Image: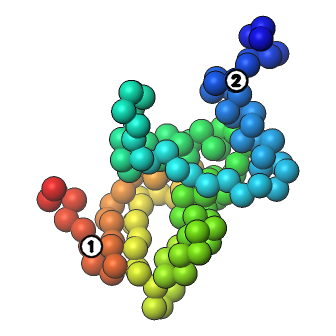
Amino acid sequence: MHVSATNPGTGTLRHAMDATAALRQAGVTILAGSDAGYIGIPGTAHGVSVHGELRLLVSAGLSHAQAWSAATSLPAQRFGLTDRGELRAGLQADMILIDGDPLTNIGDTLSIHTIWRRGQPLDRGRS
């Protein structure tokens, strides 16, 4: 296959971005999922890589709110996890308090103030 600016081929970031945009435009639910690191791919680590993926989803045409939902409520819905995915009485009460607004600036996900797990704040200094 000839690779060029108009035909980037498969396996390129541009191809992945175009495919994501096409899937979204076709009505496919897009979920975030690169937070599980893969040995051999520099820059991936459990939990951390999802921030970069969210920025890439926005670059692929999702709104900031759509990208945020791709990492929060939508996975819970798609996997039938009825005890999480939103803030509501009776659910697990997992929450990230962010300094900023990821619904208008997805980069604000990096400004984590507090993480809550099952209603309790986590001590991020503890391993």
Which mark, residue 101? none
Check the image and report above or below for 11 versus 112. Answer: above
Residue type (three-letter) at the residue carrying disc 2? Thr
In the picture, residue 39 is in which quadrant?
top left
- Helix, strand or loop for disc 1: strand
The mark that comes first in sequence, 1 or 2, is 2
Residue type (three-letter) at the residue carrying disc 1? Pro
Residue in front for this viewpoint, 114 or 11: 11
The residue furthest right is 26
Residue 29, how many percent across, how many down?
Answer: 72, 58
Residue at the (24%, 68%) spot, across then down: 122
Residue 64, how many percent across, how many down?
Answer: 63, 52
| Direction from residue 88 to residue 26 in the image, left or right | right
> What is the C-alpha distance between the residues marked 1 and 2?
43 Å
Q: Which residue matches tag 1?
A: 121
The residue furthest bottom is 90
**In this rendering, which labeled residue sits more in front, label 1 or label 2?**
2
In the picture, residue 10 is in which quadrant?
top right
Residue at the (77%, 49%) spot, across then down: 24
Residue at the (33%, 81%) spot, across then down: 119
Residue 101, how many percent across, how many down?
Answer: 52, 59
Residue in front for this viewpoint, 7 or 97: 7
- Helix, strand or loop for disc 2: loop
Which mark, residue 10? 2
Check the image and report above or below for 68 versus 73. Answer: above
Residue 18, how many percent across, how many down?
Answer: 75, 33
Residue 31 visible? The answer is yes
> Are the residues tagged 1 and 2 within 8 Å (C-beta)?
no
Query: Dot 2: within a 10 Å radius of its alpha carbon, few (fewer than 14), some, or many (20 or more) residues?
Result: few
